[in-house]
Amino acid sequence: MISLLELTLPELTRFCTEELGQSAYRARQIWQWIWRKRARSFAEMSDLSLALRERLAAVAALDRPSVAAREESRDGTVKFLLRLADGEQVETVLIPSFSQDGRPRLTLCLSCQVGCAMGCTFCGTGAMGFSRNMSCGEILSQVLLARDFLGDSPHRPLLRNLVFMGMGEPLLNLTQVLRSLEILNSDSGLAFSHRRITVSTCGLPQGLEELGASGRAYLAVSLHAPSQELRAALMPRAAAWPLADLLQALRSYPLKARERLTFAYLLLGGVNDTPEHARSLARILTPLRGKLNLIVYNQVPGSAYRAPLPEDVLAFEEILWGSKITTVLRKSMGADISAACGQLRARLAAAAKM
C-alpha cells in the first residue's frame, strides 16, 4: 500500500493517471485535501466520487506518526514525541515568539533522522546514535501535526517558520529533505516561502552545493568553535572536514539578494566562551555574509558541560558586536520540559527501563 504523503505532486499525478485511471485534475484535488485541508482519511474527500474514495482506501494510505507524549512549557514551548510506523520515536518542538503587533508567531523545529550519526559531544541526540533516515512523509507529518494542534488556517497561519534543527543531520538525508522542501515550497502544498525555512547543518561537504543550488531554504551552519582543534574536540565527525575548508566553501555558497548565512554558536561554560574565543570567532566570520545566533547551553542530564555565566555571555556578545558581527542572543526556551533535542525521548526511554 502506497503512502500518498510520500509523493510529490508530479508523482501523485502519475499515480492517479496511470494506476487509478483518473485525470490530473483529480490528483490536484487529492493533493489539496492532503496538504491544505489536512485530511486524515479518504472518506473526508467529499468532492471525490464514493467509488474513487473506496478505491483510494484500498490501495493507498494517509498514515501519520502518532503522538507518544506531549509536554508544554510555562513559556509556551510545546514538545511532541512522535511514534513512527516502525515504533521508532522522534521529537518536534513548537517554539513561540511574538510580532511587533503582539500577534503570536510560532517556529517548528523539525527532525529529519531517527537519532544522529554525528556524535557531537554536547548533544543529547548524538549520544543516542543513529537508527535510520526519516522519509519525506514522516518529516512533513510534523508540520501537519503542528497545524492541527494550532488549528491553523491557510489564510492566517500561526505557524510561520520551519527550522531543520531537530534530530539528525539534514545533509545526511538530503534526498528526503529536498523532497520535503519541494512540497513545503509548493503554493498548492504547504505553501512556505523559502525565506521561512532554514536547514541547519554541522557543516558537511556532501550535499552542501546541492542544497544551495535548490534555493528552497536558508542555510544555517553549526560552528560551536572558532578553531579546528576545539571543533574537533566538540564535534569530531563534523571536524573531519577542516574548518578552513568549510569556511572557504561557504564563501561561494549561493545567496540571493538580501540573504545571509546563519551561524549557530553554542556557549559552553569554560569551554568556548572566553573573550579570546569571541575574538577568534569574529575573525573567521568577518569575510562571510552572515549573522550569528548565540545559544546558551541547555543542560542535558549526565552531561559534563555546564551553562556559561551570564557575565561571560554578555562579554562574548559585546566583543562580537564590537567587531561588527550581527549577533542575536537566542533565549533558551522550554527548559522546564526537556526541550533540548533528544531529552524527552531519552528521559522517557530511561523511565521505561526502570
Image (cartoon, grey):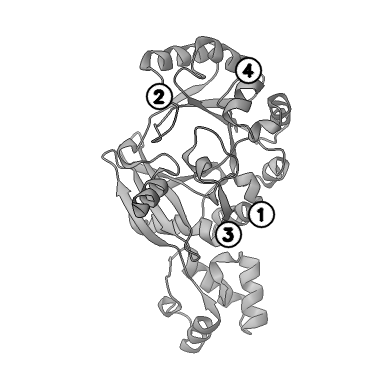
How many other residues sit within 10 Å of disc 1, few (<14), some (14-19) or many (≥20)?
Answer: some
Q: CA distance from mark 2 to mark 4?
A: 26 Å
Q: CA distance from mark 1 to mark 2?
A: 36 Å
Q: Give the secondary structure at mark 3.
A: loop
What residue do we see at 47% from left, 40% from top?
Answer: 124
Sequence-wise first label, 4 or 1: 1
Labelled disc at residue 315: none
Q: Give the secondary structure at mark 4.
A: loop
Q: Is residue 312 above or below residue 135?
A: above
Query: Which residue was labeled with disc 2?
Result: 307
What residue do we see at 51% from left, 74% from top?
Answer: 61
Query: With 121 as the anchor, is 144 left or right in this view?
Result: left
Front tag of 4 and 1 = 1
Measured as percent of width and height from the top left, residue 191 is found at 51, 54
Q: Is residue 11 above or below residue 341?
A: below
Q: CA distance from mark 3 to mark 1?
A: 9 Å
Front tag of 1 and 2 = 2
Q: CA distance from mark 3 to mark 4?
A: 37 Å
Quarter where residue 248 is shown: top right
Query: Which residue was labeled with disc 1?
Result: 175
Measured as percent of width and height from the top left, residue 209 is found at 72, 41
Query: Which residue was labeled with disc 4?
Result: 286
Res 114 visible: yes
How many other residues sit within 10 Å of disc 4, few (<14), some (14-19) or many (≥20)?
Answer: some
- Kindly indicate whether the residue at mark 2 contacts the one at mark 1 (C-beta within 8 angstroms): no
- Residue most extreme to the front: 354
How many other residues sit within 10 Å of disc 3, few (<14), some (14-19) or many (≥20)?
Answer: some
- Kindly indicate whether the residue at mark 4 contacts the one at mark 2 (C-beta within 8 angstroms): no
Sequence-wise first label, 3 or 4: 3
What residue do we see at 36% from left, 41% from top?
Answer: 338
